[in-house]
């Protein structure tokens, strides 16, 4: 029996200011932004499935996510794209192959939304 489980627990995202990042991520995900910041540098984004932790302690220009390493799910890619435009999110692609698009968070991390 292998002691390593084939399951992803959480993804860490480097952010400059954890409180600002908490507010931004909660806004685009439609979540309350009143969650506790742990140890002065961590915020656990309440997610369904794999978790996201925003961490200001690991932030540096070198640690910014330069290519999406995960994607947020959507049931309607066109609606998600228009929603992100309405939030003035920096979109880095249009809708590609009718399934996905990329964008940046305020710290420059490259992220993706995908209709699978």
Image (tube, rainbow, N blue to C red):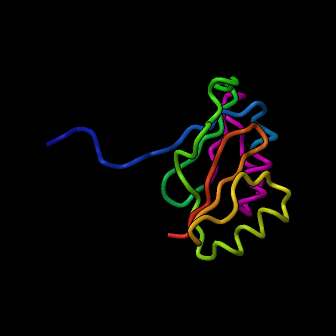
Look at the image and tell me in which quarter the N terminus lies.
top left
The residue stretch that appears in magenta = 22-46
88 on left or right of 97: right
Q: Is residue 19 magenta?
A: no
At 56% across and 68% down in the image, what residue appears? 97
Q: Is residue 24 above or below residue 20?
A: below
x, y percent for residue 38: 67, 34
At 72% across and 28% down in the image, what residue appears? 40
At 62% across and 27% down in the image, what residue appears? 63
At 58% across and 42% down in the image, what residue appears? 67
x, y percent for residue 76: 63, 76
Q: Nearer the viewer, residue 97 or 87?
A: 97
Q: Is residue 14 above or below residue 72?
A: above
Q: Nearer the viewer, residue 116 or 33?
A: 116
**Residue at the outermost left position:** 1
Total labels: the figure holds: 0
Snapshot quadrant of residue 94:
bottom right
x, y percent for residue 45: 64, 49
x, y percent for residue 29: 70, 60
1 on left or right of 101: left
63 on left or right of 33: left
Snapshot quadrant of residue 102:
bottom right
């Amino acid at each position: 029996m292998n002691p390593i489980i084939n399951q992803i627990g959480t993804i860490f995202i480097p952010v400059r200011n954890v409180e600002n990042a908490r507010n931004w991520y909660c806004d685009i995900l439609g979540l309350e932004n009143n969650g506790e910041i742990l140890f002065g540098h961590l915020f656990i984004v309440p997610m369904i499935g794999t978790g996201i932790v925003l961490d200001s302690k690991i932030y540096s220009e070198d640690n910014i996510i330069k290519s999406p390493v995960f994607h947020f799910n959507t049931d309607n890619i066109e609606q998600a794209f228009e929603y992100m435009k309405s939030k003035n999110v920096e979109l880095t692609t249009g809708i590609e192959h009718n399934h996905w698009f990329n964008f940046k968070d305020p710290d420059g991390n490259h992220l993706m939304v995908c209709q699978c």
